[in-house]
Image (cartoon, rainbow, N blue to C red):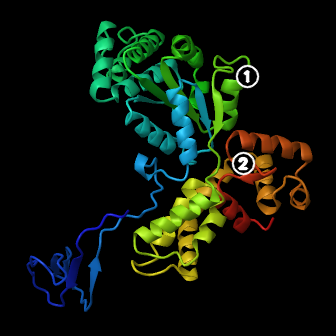
Amino acid sequence: MSERSSPTRIIRSSRCTPIAPSASGPGGGSEILVDPCVFTRHRRLKTLYTYEYDVRMERSPFPHHGPLRPEQVTGREDLAIDLAQRIADRRLTALLGPRRYGKTSLLKRVAADLEAVGHQPVWIDLYERTSIADVAAAVDRGLAGTVGPTRRTLDDIAGTFSVNLGVLGVQLSRSPKQRPDPVLTLRTLLDVLTTAAQRQSLFVVFDEFSGIANVEGGAAVLRTELQHHFQELGIVFAGSEPSTMQALFSEHTQPFFAQADLVDIGPLADDAVGRIVEEGFAATQRGTGGLASRIVQFADGHPQRAMQLADALWRHVEQGDTASLPAWEAALADVRANVDAGSERSFSLLPAGQQKALRAIAAEGSIYGTAASLLDLPAGTARDAANKLVGNGILHRRHGRLDLVDPLLADWLRRRFAI
């Protein structure tokens, strides 16, 4: 639901004298008379306005920047229930999916749902961690980020270990002789977490867990300290690099081998996207004019891109009006203008074989065939490139074929290259 305030009426006068604002306008909102004169360092400029307009503060029903608030997450109700049950049952779970597919947002909603019935969350972000000290700092920040009784419990337990939560980053910045040992500190912080789990119902979310693969010995320390508490502490891992996440839980040499159920978040269902778009427009007194289907088709299940496209269309439709085909075309042009440079940059960083594979898939949906032949893409190179692109979350396999995860990258490729 959008947030509204009383309309503010801005009347631009043709006179070049300051005018005080009146208390209220004819519609109940405030009325502001604006002096049109603009002074510069060298001269005085006069601008004449002969019109007036309403300004309404209205928030888009389609947020798409960063994680959503729990109440904004919709369209994945069944998965949210499944994840909540897994955590409550103390079944270790790894949530896999490409970036910007809504894993963090979904887990925020699950955490809020569980918190409402007495399970307290601890959120530990392992994004781009590179050392044990880095991991220890992330755990410290996660513990310090709790609130209320949970924070007090953690502080009490930390005190018995002579640890102050939330200050590790400062301690690690000291000279080598004065800073704490990172491994011992990490083990102690995990002891604090597991001890607290014996006193109250806790669960921990290790977000961007694939980052642990960059830390020598990091996964081993986590496994060693947590393994005897799996039945006391709910644990869910989330990661955006499918191949890395698969390896962390599926390879015999990895500390967490066979320790967690792997759950794929998957694309957002078409009917869910359509419903979200229709409801968002209706809630703000607008109509989609049947164009929700254009968003569904273009987004192809990508949650963030679907909301980005819906937001762009929404901004081209006035309150009380209905979306039109020109509005959709203008919205699509806006989104393309915003993302094309990023698509080109991402593409340019890939090796030549992967670039060719992406072009072939964008053109024909296959790494074999006419497009691959015209691009001089040998079958062996194509297979290797596709596997790496799937592992990096740029491609995924759907309905027996390879697809680009990001529909706007696919769209840019088709517009940028003839084949």
Residue at 73%, 43% in the rendered image: 390
* Mark 1: amino acid: Glu
Where does the N terminus fall, quadrant-wise? bottom left
Q: Depth check: 145 or 348 in front?
A: 145
Q: Can residue 339 be seen at all in this image of the molecule?
A: no
Q: How many marks?
A: 2
Say which residue appears at 57% left-offset and 15% top-offset: 223
- Residue at mark 2: 395
Q: Is residue 212 above or below residue 26?
A: above
From the viewer's side, name the closer residue of 85 and 26: 85
Q: Is residue 186 above or below residue 126?
A: above
Residue type, label 2: Leu
* 222 displayed left or right of 59: right
171 above or below 102? above
Which of the 4 image quadrants contains residue 209? Answer: top right
The quadrant of the image that shows the C terminus is: bottom right
The label on residue 153 is: none
Label 1 sits on residue: 251
| Residue 160 horizontal side relative to residue 193, left or right | left
Q: Residues within 10 Å of mark 2 (few under 14, many from 20)?
A: many
- State the image quarter where residue 373 is shown: bottom right
Q: In whole angstroms, how far apart are the C-alphas of marks 2 and 1? A: 22 Å
